[in-house]
Image (cartoon, helix red, strand yellow):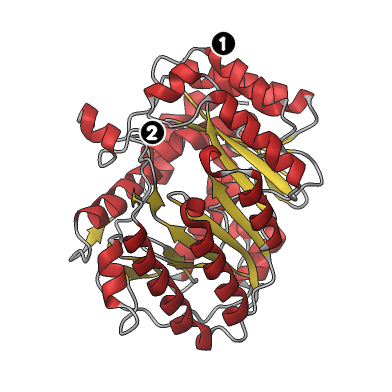
Amino acid sequence: MLPAKSLWKPVLQKWITGRVRRFRMVPSIPPFPSKLDSLGLYLHVPFCKSLCPFCPYNRVAYEKSSFERYLTAVLQEIDIHAPHLRSAEFSSLYIGGGTPTVDLTGLMRIISHLRSSLDFRGDICIELHPAHMDEDDLASLKEAGVTMLSVGVESTTDELLQRIGRNHSGKEALDALGRARRVGFDTINADLMFALPDQTVDQWRHDVLAVLDQGVDQLSTYPMFTFPYSDHGREVRARSVQRPRDSTIRAMLRFTDQECIDRGFDRCAVWSWNRPNTGKFSSITRHRYLGFGPSAATMDGDHFYVNTFDVDAYADCLPAHRPVALAMEVDTRLEMAYWLYWRVYELFVPAAEFDRLFGPEESLDSRFGTLFSTARAAGMAEKTSDGYVISPAGAYWIHRLQNEYSLNYINRLWGTCRRDPWPAKAVL
């Protein structure tokens, strides 16, 4: 078996680079979604009471009047789509931000409207900030049908939390996890950030142990990326995504993997571990999804498009027009690549699902056999009767690929849309 690193630059990188295409997104309004089997829903709530400087996501400071405009517009956007979704089957609703519960009464109205307008009955997954998780809020979320939580702990070390601009302490975050566990949800995920500025491996170990000791069902970990358009990125004048040191990443991930496995968790994605027989919390792995709200994206199998990021522009165009800022067509090859990317991220590529989605005339090996042959030779993947399993070594190199390619795509699209509510184009 050849070592993974020896194949990375001369073979695997060449294979991928040779297949990377430039995609051009332009102002256009795609047809309403037509591939409606197991469609995920996404709701973006772009408001926060405190803006974290490292956060790359679309968010603005909370003001009651601005939120009211947003609320009216979201309900209108749902209403525009409702007549076209009568036959749709929805797998889940994911609510992200921002801080989705910054105005809990408004959020409850949106959830209720989605249920009544789209006859939605699936799982509801929501991102939470530890400072907005008192017992009454959690009870209201459970009553509204929320089944899965993801809590942005980020760190339990106060010094690090202050350094990255968080407005809660480590104790407050751990207490919030405890309250959520007592209220009772199907899955409680905790997010932790690693390779923070000057963070030591010992501090990381402390964070992981503290969170796991709270009895969470899933642990998701992320390195700190420096996006050029984020507040932190502008501060350090970064020109591209800066990847943390390999040695730090490897040590932190190695400890996390071993500790989670020792506690009976399974690795369910590149940076995530969960308990067996519990629902997996994930924001980004739905194959087809429909997004509502400023900056929400939609991938319906025929088109990929994104709403305007600007809250006022979003509200102004509704209900007369859909708030789509940029769009592009998705051909079969691109949809296959998109599906493959997220299955590899989840560390298992199921052949049967590929056949179901793309038809009996296609096969996983005929489309991606060269890639998997290279990955197997490098010790990054193993073929099974059901598909392909990604190895721990492969998981690390997937992390590297995300830094090399996909985050640059995000930089181009999100950076463009943050600068202009209605961009002329974005080249990815």
- Residue nearest the observer in this picture, 206 or 23: 206
In the rendered view, tell whether residue 318 sits above or below residue 93: below
Q: Find residue 145 and report its horizontal and vertical position in percent.
A: 69, 62
Q: Find residue 148 and report its horizontal and vertical position in percent.
A: 67, 51
Locate residue 327: give its quadrant.
bottom left
Image quarter (top left, top right, bottom left or bottom right) of the N terminus: top right
Answer with left or right where residue 162 lies relative to residue 377. left
Label 1: which residue?
Answer: 202
Residue type, numbered disc 2: Phe
In the rendered view, tell whether residue 365 sits above or below residue 71: above
Q: Nearer the viewer, mark 1 or mark 2?
A: 1
Q: Find residue 321 and report its horizontal and vertical position in percent.
A: 31, 82
Image quarter (top left, top right, bottom left or bottom right) of the C terminus: bottom left
- Residue nearest the observer in this picture, 302 or 143: 143
Locate residue 244: give its quadrant.
top left
Residue type, numbered disc 1: Asp
Answer with left or right where residue 112 lies relative to residue 275. left
Answer with left or right where residue 174 lies relative to residue 315. right
Say which residue appears at 56% left-offset and 11% top-offset: 202
Q: Find residue 211 and report its horizontal and vertical position in percent.
A: 65, 27
Locate residue 351: give its quadrant.
bottom right
Across the whole image, how many numbered discs are drawn on residues?
2
Say which residue appears at 44% left-offset and 38% top-offset: 401
- Residue nearest the observer in this picture, 419 or 351: 419
Q: Is residue 411 visible?
A: yes
In the rendered view, tell whether residue 322 sits above or below residue 110: below
Q: Earlier in the sequence, mark 1 or mark 2?
A: 1
Numbered disc 2: secondary structure: loop
Label 2: which residue?
Answer: 225
* Dot 2 alpha-carbon crowd within 10 angstroms: few under 14, some 14 to 19, many 20 or more: many
